[in-house]
Image (spheres, rainbow, N blue to C red):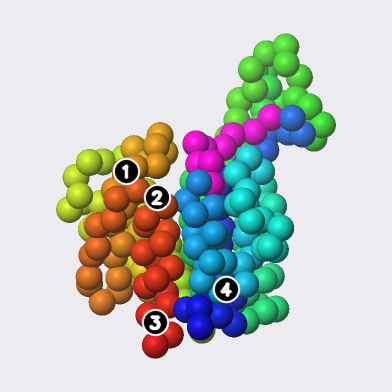
Amino acid sequence: MKKLSGKKVLITSGGTLEKWDRVRGHTNLSKGTMGCYLAESALANGAEVIYLHGYFATLPTNAKSMRTIMFEGIEDLGEKIKSIVQTEHIDFVIMAAAGSDWIIDKVYDQSGNLIEEKGKMPSDEPPIIHFKKAPKVLGQIKEWAPDTTLIGFKLEATDDVDYLIHRAKLRMETSNATYMVANSSNSLYGVHEPHYIVSSTGEVERVEGKEETAKVLVELLGTTLD
């Protein structure tokens, strides 16, 4: 019997898109590669996979065998996760999406007038954009679904492994996650960078590359059911 047979796994993947107007916005460099590997591995292990992906994210090879749902900004992502985990029993939530830290608050022209045009901002002069702090979705998931097993990712722009793992442990504690995967920003530029799977019991496992990390992580999830 496959390790995740009969289990439902929600995987978020790719970057959020925070729109300034109907044609412009800001995002990040996440392409959804890790999310694809996780989805394929979970599917191969018998899980029912819900793949919640960003606007520009890559889709898994076997996406037709999954339920795929697109999200735009971080608030939209949070709303979609909340709706799913509160209306369905989700065994595992793997939060691999790269969420924005900042979202749009207000936009002004160079004279200080509020721009309320929702179609396309004038391109004659650069706008003045005021941002506000984005909500931290990861920290709310266990409030929405206390019985789900939560797995998060923590990316830092550092090569200091001890610091990276320290930050991952802090994020794991504040979000009440069972596992946190720590990786440096170098992983945005390739698939072979090491990842560190940190468990809530204190173990740390170094794994080389995104594909192998996904396989090891899904195997670990299978052991939580033993």
The residue carrying mark 1 is 193
Element type at mark 1: loop
Label 1 vs label 4: CA separation?
27 Å
Q: Which residues are magenta?
A: 24-32
| Tag 2 secondary structure | helix
Q: CA distance from mark 4 to mark 3?
A: 14 Å
Callout 3: helix, strand or loop? loop
> Mark 2 sits on what residue?
210
User: For the residue marked with disc 4, what is the amino acid?
Assistant: Ala
- Identify the secondary structure beneath mark 4: loop
x 36%, y 64%: residue:
216
- Compare marks 1 and 2 and give the one earlier in the sequence: 1
Q: Is residue 79 left or right of residue 221?
A: right
| Residue 136 on image: x %, y % | 50, 58
In space, the residues marked 1 and 3 are separated at their CA atoms by 26 Å
Q: List the single residue furthest toward the bottom.
A: 226
Which of the two discs, 3 and 2, labels the residue nearer the N terminus? Answer: 2
**In terms of sequence position, does the residue under pointer 2 or pointer 4 come before the other?**
4
Q: Amino acid at mark 2?
A: Lys
